[in-house]
Amino acid sequence: GAGVSQSPSNKVTEKGKDVELRCDPISGHTALYWYRQSLGQGLEFLIYFQGNSAPDKSGLPSDRFSAERTGGSVSTLTIQRTQQEDSAVYLCASSLGTGDYEQYFGPGTRLTVT
Amino acid sequence: RKEVEQDPGPFNVPEGATVAFNCTYSNSASQSFFWYRQDCRKEPKLLMSVYSSGNEDGRFTAQLNRASQYISLLIRDSKLSDSATYLCVVNGGGSYIPTFGRGTSLIVHP
């Protein structure tokens, strides 16, 4: 079946511009996570959605970052007034639920802020 | 102390070698454990789950030691294609956010 998809695969933007990154999770997966990974670094948790519950935003690095998940499916991560330190690969993952369920990752969006 | 710790390596081994990685975790209430593989500039992919009784999949064996709070991954008969970063993931224990280790780099050379 179809895996997690993300778009765009690459995004180059100028400092100060806003960007939107999209994630389509696996159908039926109720949990959705956003991470970012800088070059040579580990995964940094950003935000988590589970069903209709309020999202866990504890990993968002600043108020320039926000995310929403419409209809319990597609999610959009928005970064306002981008900075060069926002340059990274943004990864989305989904899972059947929380707890013992493994995550499946999308291919990521490589964001470069110039 | 970091929640999940891994030796970053790199582990540089010849083809055919056996190599083992450990991953320690700090939350004794953790409930589920996984190994992921991440190739350069690619997304992490699930390699295997780690069960209390251990788990074997071909050349790969994963084990859990709850008393000492670590999980291990053993790779037998290493192939060039095994070269990647191996991420340890720990879940549960009061949080629904999986905790990822920083990964262990493996380089298999001819």
Image (tube, helix red, strand yellow):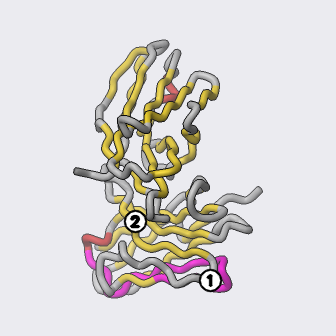
Residue A36 screen position, x and y as percent: 39, 64
Q: Nearer the viewer, residue A91 or B54?
A: B54
- Seen at 57% across and 78% down, the residue is A75
- Residue B85 in which image quadrant: top left
Q: Nearer the viewer, residue B57 or A37?
A: B57
Q: Relative to A13, is A29 on the left or the right?
A: right
Name the chain under label 1: A
- Residue bounds of the magenta highlight: A67-83
Write down the residue under mark 2: A45
Please name the amino acid that badge 2 sits on.
Phe
A108 vs B20: above or below? below
Q: Relative to A19, is A4 on the left or the right?
A: right
Secondary structure beneath label 2: strand
- Residue A83 in which image quadrant: bottom left
CA gap, disc 2 and disc 1: 20 Å
Q: Nearer the viewer, residue B68 or A69?
A: B68
